[in-house]
Every structure is written in structure tokens, then in C-alpha cells.
Image (tube, coloured by chain):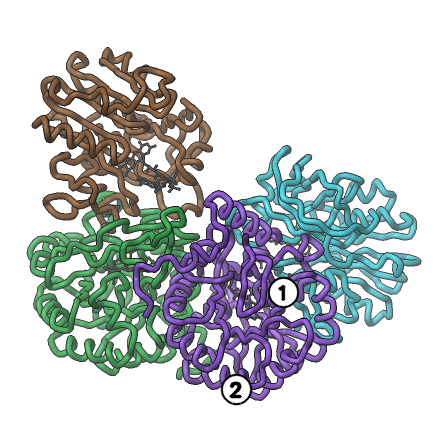
Chain colours: A purple, B green, C brown, D cyan
Amino acid sequence: MLETTLCGVTLKNPVIAASGTFGFGAEYSQLFDVGRLGGICTKGLTLHPREGNPGLRVWETPAGMMNSVGLQNPGIPVFLERELPRMRTLGTAIIANVGGGDLEEYIEGVRLLSNADGVDIVELNISCPNVHEGGMAFGINSEVAAGVVGAVRRVCSKPLMVKLSPNAEDITAMAIACEQAGADAVSLVNTFKALAIDIHARKAVFDNVTAGLSGPCIKPIALRMVWEVARAVHIPVVGIGGIATWQDALEFIMAGATAVQVGTATFVKPTTMLEIIDGLERYCANEHLTSLATVCNILGTVPKL
Amino acid sequence: MLETTLCGVTLKNPVIAASGTFGFGAEYSQLFDVGRLGGICTKGLTLHPREGNPGLRVWETPAGMMNSVGLQNPGIPVFLERELPRMRTLGTAIIANVGGGDLEEYIEGVRLLSNADGVDIVELNISCPNVHEGGMAFGINSEVAAGVVGAVRRVCSKPLMVKLSPNAEDITAMAIACEQAGADAVSLVNTFKALAIDIHARKAVFDNVTAGLSGPCIKPIALRMVWEVARAVHIPVVGIGGIATWQDALEFIMAGATAVQVGTATFVKPTTMLEIIDGLERYCANEHLTSLATVCNILGTVPKL
Amino acid sequence: MTSSSPAYVEGATVLSQERLTEDVYRLTVATTTGGTPGQFYMLRAWEREPLLARPISVHNVEEDIVSFLYQVRGRGTELLARLEQGGKVALSGPLGHGFRTEGLRGRIAIVTGGIGIAPMFCLARTLPPGDVTVIAGFRSHPYAVAQLVDLSVDVRVTTEDGCNGTRGFCTAIFDPHVYDTVVTCGPMPMMARVAHLCAEAGVPCQASLEAHMACGVGACLVCSCPTVLGNKLVCADGPVFDAAEVIWHA
Amino acid sequence: MTSSSPAYVEGATVLSQERLTEDVYRLTVATTTGGTPGQFYMLRAWEREPLLARPISVHNVEEDIVSFLYQVRGRGTELLARLEQGGKVALSGPLGHGFRTEGLRGRIAIVTGGIGIAPMFCLARTLPPGDVTVIAGFRSHPYAVAQLVDLSVDVRVTTEDGCNGTRGFCTAIFDPHVYDTVVTCGPMPMMARVAHLCAEAGVPCQASLEAHMACGVGACLVCSCPTVLGNKLVCADGPVFDAAEVIWHA
Ligand SMILES: Cc1cc2nc3c(=O)[nH]c(=O)nc-3n(C[C@H](O)[C@H](O)[C@H](O)COP(=O)(O)OP(=O)(O)OC[C@H]3O[C@@H](n4cnc5c(N)ncnc54)[C@H](O)[C@@H]3O)c2cc1C
Ligand SMILES: Cc1cc2nc3c(=O)[nH]c(=O)nc-3n(C[C@H](O)[C@H](O)[C@H](O)COP(=O)(O)OP(=O)(O)OC[C@H]3O[C@@H](n4cnc5c(N)ncnc54)[C@H](O)[C@@H]3O)c2cc1C
Ligand SMILES: Cc1cc2nc3c(=O)[nH]c(=O)nc-3n(C[C@H](O)[C@H](O)[C@H](O)COP(=O)(O)O)c2cc1C
Ligand SMILES: Cc1cc2nc3c(=O)[nH]c(=O)nc-3n(C[C@H](O)[C@H](O)[C@H](O)COP(=O)(O)O)c2cc1C
Ligand code: FES
Ligand code: FES
């Protein structure tokens, strides 16, 4: 009932582990059967290995958390050699999330991933708020984003999903620009740029000053953005942001998402995604739906743009 | 110790009741001594009376709430005649928050308020997400905003504070544009455009589909925006968004706010603002500060833009 | 039960919490803030979630206590139900305009559905018992009825499952023509029906409305309800309205 | 106390909650998930706030129980302390790499500050008592010491206020030269000092580090600590590290 096709790739269900919150899948396989998931987005990968940000990397906020990991990763070549083979044994779709410091790094990184057996979808992260030199810079302005997406598209033989930033000037225009530049899908949202201050130390909690906000607190805004984008583009939309229950996931689907990603809620309760899958399954059964597509994008009273 | 000057107006302290959450002041004076506040922003006023939005107007979210009041108000002439005299007996600064459906309504409304005895500051709301025809439309794009602010400035003999929307394409550019167009201060943020879906009814919770998100959940993002804006402009910044404790208020001040506004937290606990005032007072005493200005904008490691 | 000015009390002490049915409780709190029939309090007995306080009608008032009768509906009322004797609850009140008792004359019908019976005990106490008929509908087991009977009020019960009294809705056994004034509280469709019957019969009716609230004092305008005189605030203009003013089914 | 594979247990039952000092508690939970000395669990005993689970070291393990020794620091530990016998706690574990006991030979010093003593009871149990000296520093009243004495371990206490044992810091009475290996847990400055003394004396030292955590399993990378071999994860590579590897004062 929950089987979902996302840019040509068949997922067992529409519930995907969000990038950066699920390592390379094996970590959580200690605690539950990750093979039940629809897919796993890898930790954000870059061509070259990165150490990530110094200082404190996590901070709690009301119904949310801020992180400043900063794309710590072993680099794509090491990922392909060491992590991908293990990921392929997990029995779920593999979505390689890729970031970059400059256009060259994006292109070279995607080229490598695109040639790798076992990577089902490439998720282009143009929206990481935690890297100084790049990442989010590409995710603010639609034209800049279109440039990256177009360039990456040319070297990418895999389905290409672009992950959008809620910090974009105009997320709808951004999604349209990505679609026109060749994206097969968009996923949104990444974390919101946020600030926390240590009043005792009289300085920012994070060395980078700002960090990325995620968790239930952002859900209402993320849901609005997904709804706006789903009305504006013709490619699939993957909803992300504060999803913690099957009801949350269903809201995103009703707003127009084909699938969802779950991040922070997995920290709160490792089995959250399994509960979401079970809940959606029960919902379909109770409502006699043969597929969730029936209730996708049903706020349709308002016409498509 | 807490006395604060905001565009030439002396406030007892920097804690102001946020527009739309405190009526015209008398309502809450049933429950506590509102004369202790630094100031009160009126419910959003428009030249002509408005009935506000139909349907449900409030919805709770994790650590926040959404509202869709839609500028219900008796109109500025009735305000001046019926509410302002009573407000003037409350013993605190009066900030008239003004919205509008079009430029004409803004100009006419501000002209009336500007001539009224007892209005200390005019707060121009270009950021209400809950009115279809206007309000927020002016708060998205910097040039459009500058147009309204410039036009209003010409008829406004009172200090003019412009209230910014977090939904702006670029809130820093927006603040700079308002400053250049003649604003004496900026206040931020208004509510975030957000969505909630009733999965049983399979439709949006609000008749307007989207509504405005406020409360503790938005604080980390609002604080980041205040910090960015405070670094970019030379006029005072008033911080708003999820402030619920004196520590929250102090974070905004450290991020560069001269004063703060408190909205949703008053619903949670009517005496929140008094506790914030007391807390700031104690903080100053404990830290031997003669004024909060000492700790204002102290994330100064990063140079002013 | 004289009208008193509202106050915010941060930590009022719980004197008792009684469970009347599976999901209906009576909470009695030590406070001298009082209230008149139909007024309500905003209650909060938790730290963070849900964000907002919950409006609950005054069920009974003595000099230094106020009691509330409430049904567990969601998270807020569930947390209220966890309060134990000696526990603390934050309250603001009494708020709003209650029943216009000066308008209650002659033969009076009090028509309630479910937990709509909550505000009626303190109301009935103020009325001459012989003049009052309570018609109270419940889904299943009735509650808070015995105390009305103790007042010598004529109480007629209906239950949807027929476990007690007449089977069916309370509106089925309510004939407005035999009363001079009517008071109602309960689910909106039920009150709309009562209002309609009263309007047809030309009998004045006061209805206590519900709305989601944030401030409870008239400051935020989220609790508006459409009336023939424009949008009104349930918290500050109501919660009790002349039923003829309310636009039912808006 | 053999190593077992980690599990997520949603509702483990609290067997006991003992208050040892004003802010130190021992929580014993029914679970067969076990753990080795130095490993930890992610605990959660509340519904919404704080968002994240809290890492707490294994204090003791029997076949079907695990106990934790913890100090109330903020909201999370405060809520843990509210647990009562029969209550439920969600836990993931045992997680991380504990003490490398194969490397613990000869005369062993266990140097702790404050609640850093938590993981040491189950460690000391696995070591030959005659070889072990525990040097435990406290701000004021010591706790969890008697049970170490019961193991016939040589325990030396220091307190900052002098209310018990030697007045001062534990590092003042710690001479690395008389030991073959050292194990430490406590506040970072204290462990840095111990690591420094050991390095100077050429004595191997294992330190159990702390970091704010989100996932606890190596998936989110928020708990990184700088080492001479690059950033490592406290949760998955540690929490126990070779003290010589750690870059103290980074
Ligand atoms: C003036 C007034 C007096 C009231 N007096 C009583 C009383 O004496 N006893 C009693 O049991 N209840 C009373 N209510 C209703 C009570 O406020 C709601 O049942 C309560 O707020 C639900 O909160 P919750 O967190 O348990 O449920 P939620 O999880 O918030 O909601 C559960 C269900 O209740 C509905 N609901 C939530 N809030 C309200 C609300 N304010 N009004 C109507 N429906 C709501 C929701 O739409 C949902 O269907 C009164 C309401 C008002 C406005
Ligand atoms: C592997 C590991 C094992 C631990 N074992 C124990 C133990 O056995 N007993 C025990 O009492 N404590 C232990 N801790 C520390 C414990 O996790 C923190 O004290 C706890 O998370 C604080 O949560 P809180 O909500 O009470 O405090 P908060 O309100 O979150 O914070 C209060 C203070 O504690 C600090 N703090 C918060 N979280 C951590 C953290 N994860 N690590 C270090 N400091 C933190 C904050 O910066 C703040 O200064 C361990 C930590 C780790 C990483
Ligand atoms: C600790 C952490 C690390 C993250 N790292 C990445 C990343 O490397 N790449 C990426 O695209 N998104 C990253 N994200 C963003 C998440 O994938 C997700 O978009 C965001 O957290 C919102 O979803 P949530 O509220 O369900 O967590 C990270 C989020 C967190 C919390
Ligand atoms: C019910 C409600 C009504 C509001 N009405 C107005 C308004 O009329 N004009 C305005 O400028 N802001 C209005 N706001 C926004 C608040 O003034 C404030 O900017 C926002 O709520 C964020 O602050 P908070 O998180 O402290 O509530 C309203 C907010 C709420 C919750
Ligand atoms: S609840 Fe705020 S005006 Fe009624
Ligand atoms: S806490 Fe997530 S990697 Fe360590």
C-alpha cells in the first residue's frame, strides 16, 4: 500500500531517513531494522574529506535543536569504498546527499556518485547553513541555484533531487528554477539559520555564531513551504521538517509531498520512522486507500500556479 | 537601571507588549499592573474598521501557536476616540501599530495617528501574513517596503518604527531599505507564514490556508534575524519573537536589540512581562550594570557590515 | 457568588479531584476569586505543552473555593486530570460575562448536552428551584445530575445509548413552549437546535458558546464568533450570548 | 557484565530510585541489555521537553538490571530524578566503547571528580581489588564511595570544603608515578590535569569524556572531540579514549 515511486525509483514506503541524522545507516541498525525504511539519505558528502566545525555542535531549543556539524564526512572516494558496500546490505534505497565548497567540488562529487553502483538517487544539498565557504550560498538565490543544478545535471546520470533551504529568498521561485535547470525532484526543507546566545559567557553558543534549527518547532513553516512548492512545480516534492508522527507525515503528503524525510525525531525516539510507517499503513487500511497518492496534494481547492 | 530611550521616547524599561496580543492594554489590566510595562503596542489598526478573518483563528503547534486574526480592529478614528483616551491612563508608552490594505490606507492612517496626542511611536506593520490584500505584500520585497515607508514618513511627525516580516526575501536588505527610507527604528519579527492541515477533514485548519506562527518555537530564528539586522543598520532595533523569560530578552539585547516585545508568552502566563522586567533588573544589579546598553550588541566580534 | 474582579493566581492549591465517570472530573481549588454562573477561568497545570491555558467554566463557587467540572478531551484536560490534592494550578479569572440572571424569570429550562452541564450547578443554585427544569443529554452515563436533584430542581435525563432516562437527544424532549426563558450549553449543533426551537417559539434563550482561546481576556481576538451585530469575542463579550444574536452554522 | 548488543527499550521499569545526596541519585532499571564498564545509555523519561535523550554511564550491571548514578544538572536529569519505582524510562544502549580492561594491569589508579565516579563501580568490580586505588574528589559530601570500600578497594577521598577526607582537589593527592595504569572521569579541567600528569610520568591513562549528544550511536556527528588522530565521536569512538590522544583545551 505504501510503495512509492520517486523519480523512477521504487521505495518500499515514503519514509526516508534525513541526511546528517542517520549516518550511513549502519549506526542505527544496532537499534532497529533499518531495512524497513523507504530509503536512507547519507550524511552530507563532499568530494574531499572534511573535519567539520570546531566547538559545540548541538543545542536544544523549545521543541527543536540547533546543530553546527558543518559537513564532517570522509569524502566521496572513501564513502564509495568503505561505506557504500555496507549500506547496500541494508536493503533500502540509498540516496547520496552531496554538498560542496564550490561548483567544481559539486560537479566532481556528483560525477563520482553518479557512476557508483548502488546509489539510487543523488540529493544535491545547496542548503547547508553551517559551512562558511559554500553550501548555503548556493541555496539563497534562485539564479545561483539554477547554475549549480544545471552544471551538476550534465554530469549526473542518476535521478537528481535538489534539497532546498528555507532560508532561500523565495523558495517557490527557487524550486521552479531547479526544475527548469533539470532537477528530477526537490526535497525541502533543510535547517533554518538560527542563533543562540550564552548570556553568561556573553557570546554565541556556536563558534560559527549561527547554526541550523530542526525539529518539531519548524514543522508549521516547513509544511507551508512544501505546500507552496508542490503547487508550483511538476516534479515530485519530498517533505522534510519536524516530522515526528504519522499524522505529521500525512500532513506533508496532503500538502503535496510524494515522500517524507525524518531527521531530528529519530534522536528523540530511534524507532520513530517505523511508527510512522506503521501508522500510515493503518491509515490506508482504515480509509480503504490503495495508495497514499489518493490523498497527496489534496489542498487543491487553490488552483496550481 | 532599565530606563531605555527608543527613538527619542523614554521607556521605563525595554519590555513592550507586542501588537495584537495585548488589545488596547485595558484587557490585561484586569490581571496585572500594566503600568509597569515599558510600552504597549496597540492591536494592528487600519484606517477603516475590519471584521478580521472568518473560521478558526488559533491553533497550537509544538512550542508555538498559529493565528489568523486578520487585522480585526475598530478603525483608527474609533481608536482615537474610544481607546486612546483610556490607554493614556495606563501610565506607559503607547505605540500605535498600523496596517493597511493599500498605500493610501497606510498614509491616511498614519496621518491621523501622527496628529494624535498621546501616541508616542507609530509602528508600521508591513508584515501581517493574515490579510490577503496587503500587509505582508509590502513586507516581502525591500523596494516595495521602501516605497511605503518613504510615503508614510512624509506624513508622520511621530517617531516611525517599521515592523519587519521574517518572510521577507532578505530581512537585512529590508531593514537597510527601511532605514534609508526614513524609519527611526525597526522591530522584528512578525509571525512566520505557516500551515496546519486537519488530516481528518483533509483540508487546511485555517480558512486562509496559511496563518502566522509565533511563540517560543520561533525564537532561535527571530534572534538570528535581529542579530543580522542590528549589525546592518544604525537605527535602534526592537527584538520580537518567542520571548518568554528574562534570559530570552537578554539574548535579544545582546544580539543588538534596544528593547523587546513580548506576545504569545503573555497568553501562557499573564505576568510574563513583569517577570522579565524583574529578571532584567536583578541581572543588572548582580552584574553591576548601570544600563542594559552595556551588554547590547556584544556579539561584536563580527564587524558591523 | 457575587461578581468579583478577575485575578491571575499562579499556584492555587487543589483541594480535591474527583473522577465522576470515565472521562469527567470535578476539580476543586482553593481561591477567593469567585465568579458568577457562566463565567470561566483560564487554567494551566503543566510546564510547557500545550502552550495555552484552557478555558473552563465555573461549576460552583463558595467563599474560598471554586470548582470545575470538565471532560478529558485532549492533552490539556488530560493534564488537568492528573492533578492531585495538594497540587498547584495556575488560573486567571473569573472571566467573561455569564448568564444574565436578571433575565431569567418564570419557568426556566436549562438544556444541556454532555459537559455543557458544567456551568449549570451554580446557575441553578441562584434560581428558585420550583421554576427550573434541567433537560440534560448525555452520550451514556449521566454525571453531575444528583447535585441538581438535591437542589430540588426538576431534572430530565436523556442518553444516546438509553442507559439512563429517555433514549435519544435532549432536544427531542425539549418543548420551548412550556418555558418562559431558556438557557443552553453543549455542543454547537445541539445549541443551534435549541436556539432554533426557541426562536420559533418566541422564547428568549441564552447560550454559552465555546471557542478556542489564547488570552481569555479580550486582548488577542482569536475567539471571535459571528453575530448579527458583527464579530464578537466569546471570552469578553460572552461566553454567554443571546441565542438570537448568534449566527449559528457560520 | 559481558558486552551485549545495544537495543532500544521503550518502557523499561524502574526498580528503585535512591537519593544519595542533595542532587545525586541512583536509578535501577529492569533490563537485560547489560553493558561493560564505561559504556552508557541514552535515557528519556519525559514526553516532550527536553527534546533529546540524556547520556548516562552504566554504574552497575547485573543479569537483568542496569543501574545509573547521576547528578541533577538541568531539566533532563531533574526529570529523571522524578521517576519513581514502577515508573517507565526509555533507554537505548549499551552504547559506545568502554574502558579497555585488557590494558588495565599492575597497580591501577582510578581518579574521579564529582559524578565522574559513576562508571567506576562496575569497573572496579572487574579488577583485582588489591591492585586498585580510587582517588575520588568531591565538592562536598562524598557519595557512592562505601560500595567501593565494600569491594576492598583502597579509596581516598578529597573534598573541596574539607568536610570529608583531604581538603582540596583529587589531583593534589594523585601521584602517577606509583601506578602502572590510570583511569579517569570527571570535569574536563580535572581530566586534563590527570592526563597531563600521566603523560609527564609516562603512565598510560584512559579518560571517559563527555559531550552533548543527540543520537548516541554515531549517526549525527554532534559529539565530536578533537584528537591527535582527527575529530572523533565521543559516543561511538569513545566515550573512553586514550588520554594521550585527546587534545585537551581545544
Ligand atoms: C468559555 C468556555 C468554557 C468552557 N467550559 C468547560 C467546562 O466547564 N468543562 C469542560 O469540560 N470544558 C469546557 N470548555 C471546553 C474546554 O475548554 C476544552 O474542552 C479544552 O480546552 C480542550 O483542551 P484539550 O487540551 O483537552 O483538548 P485539545 O487537544 O486542545 O482539543 C481536543 C478537542 O477539543 C476541541 N477544543 C479544544 N479547545 C477548545 C475550546 N476552547 N473550545 C471548544 N473546543 C475546544 C478541539 O478542537 C478538539 O476537537 C469550555 C470552553 C470555553 C470556551
Ligand atoms: C557518555 C556520557 C556519560 C555520562 N554519564 C553520566 C553519569 O553517569 N552520571 C551523570 O550524572 N552524568 C553523566 N553524563 C552527563 C549527563 O549526560 C549530563 O549531565 C546531562 O545530559 C545533563 O542534562 P540536563 O538536562 O540535566 O542538563 P542541561 O540543562 O542539558 O545542562 C545542564 C548543564 O550540563 C551540561 N551538559 C548538558 N548535557 C551534557 C552532556 N551530554 N555532557 C556534558 N555536559 C552536559 C550543560 O552544558 C549545562 O552546563 C554523561 C555524559 C556523557 C556524554
Ligand atoms: C545533526 C544534523 C545534521 C544534518 N546534516 C545534514 C547534511 O549533512 N546534509 C543535509 O542535506 N541536511 C542535513 N541536515 C538537515 C536534515 O537532513 C533535515 O533537513 C533537517 O534536520 C530538518 O528535518 P528534521 O526537523 O526532521 O530534523 C542535518 C540535520 C541535523 C539535525
Ligand atoms: C493573536 C496574534 C495577533 C497578532 N496581531 C498582530 C497585529 O495586529 N499587528 C502586528 O504587527 N503584529 C501582530 N502579531 C504579531 C506579534 O505582535 C508578534 O510580532 C509575534 O507574535 C511574535 O512574537 P511572540 O512570539 O512573542 O508572540 C500578532 C500575534 C498574535 C499571536
Ligand atoms: S481569547 Fe483572546 S480575545 Fe478571546
Ligand atoms: S551523539 Fe550522534 S554521533 Fe555522537
- Residue at 68 percent of width and 35 percent of height: D16
Amino acid under disc 1: Ala
Q: Give the residue type at disc 2.
A: Ala
Q: Which comes before the other along the chain, label 1 or label 2?
A: 1
- The C terminus of chain A is located in which quarter? bottom left
In the shown orientation, is residue A80 left or right of residue B125? right
Secondary element at image label 1: strand
Q: Is residue B111 left or right of residue D202?
A: left
In the image, residue B34 lies at what x, y percent? 24, 51
Q: Which of the pair A52/D83 is nearer the observer?
A: A52
C-alpha distance separating marks 1 and 2: 25 Å
The image shows residue B90 at horizontal and vertical percentages of 17, 52
Q: Residue at x 23, y 64 (%)?
A: B132
Chain ID for label 1?
A
Residue C76, by quadrant, is top left
Q: Is residue A145 left or right of residue C171?
A: right
Check disc 1 and report the residue beneath it: A93
Residue B153 point in image, percent of width and height: 16, 77
Q: Is residue C192 left or right of residue C229?
A: right
The label number, if any, that marks residue A151 in the structure image: 2
What is the chain identity of the residue bearing mark 2? A
